[in-house]
Image: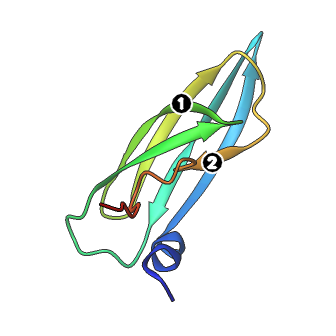
C-alpha cells in the first residue's frame, strides 16, 4: 500500500446541503483517524470543481460551512491532490 492510499483511508467527510432562497449552504465536517495527538492539517474543499476554502482538520475533525449560489452536485476533498503530492526535481 502506497503513502497516498494510506492517507486516503485517514480522511472522510460528512455534510448536508440546505437551501435558503437562491443560496445553498454546505455544512459538515472532515474527519481524520490514525494520526498522532495534536496533528493538524489544512484540507482544501471543492464543490463541482470550484474551490470553496480550506478546513483546518485537528486531532479528529474540522468543521466547515460554505455558501453557494447554486446547489452543488458533489463535494471533494483535496481535488487537486495538493496534500502529500510527490514532486520531481
Question: Circle 1: is it few (<14), some (14-19), or many (20+) Cα within 10 Å?
Answer: some
In the picture as drawn, the residue positioned furthest to the bottom comes out as: 1
**Relative to residue 79, is residue 87 drawn left or right?**
left
Q: Which one is nearer the viewer's eye here, 13 or 74? A: 74
Q: Residue at x 60, y 22 (%)?
A: 67
Question: Circle 2: is it few (<14), some (14-19), or many (20+) Cα within 10 Å?
Answer: some
Q: Which mark is residue 52?
A: 1
Rendering coords of residue 60 (x, y %): 37, 64
Q: Which mark is residue 76?
A: 2
**Relative to residue 41, is residue 38 drawn left or right?**
left
Residue 70, relative to residue 34: is it above or below?
above
Q: Which one is nearer the viewer's eye here, 57 or 50? A: 50
Quadrant of image for the C terminus: bottom left
Name which quarter of the figure residue 25 lies in: top right
Earlier residue among tags 2 and 1: 1
Q: Residue at x 45, y 72 (%)?
A: 7
Rendering coords of residue 52 (x, y %): 53, 30
Circle 1 SS class: strand
Circle 2 SS class: strand
Q: Residue at x 53, y 41 (%)?
A: 45
Q: Residue at x 51, y 89 (%)?
A: 1
The colour scheme is rainbow
Q: Which mark is residue 21?
A: none
Residue 25, relative to residue 2: is it above or below?
above
Amino acid at each position: 500500500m502506497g503513502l497516498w492510499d494510506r492517507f486516503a483511508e485517514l480522511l472522510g467527510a460528512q455534510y448536508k446541503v440546505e437551501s435558503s432562497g437562491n443560496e445553498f449552504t454546505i455544512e459538515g465536517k472532515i474527519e481524520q483517524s490514525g494520526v498522532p495527538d495534536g496533528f493538524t492539517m489544512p484540507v482544501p474543499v471543492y464543490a463541482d470543481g470550484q474551490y470553496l476554502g480550506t478546513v483546518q482538520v485537528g486531532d479528529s475533525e474540522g468543521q466547515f460551512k460554505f455558501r453557494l449560489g447554486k446547489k452543488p452536485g458533489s463535494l471533494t476533498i483535496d481535488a487537486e491532490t495538493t496534500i502529500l503530492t510527490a514532486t520531481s526535481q
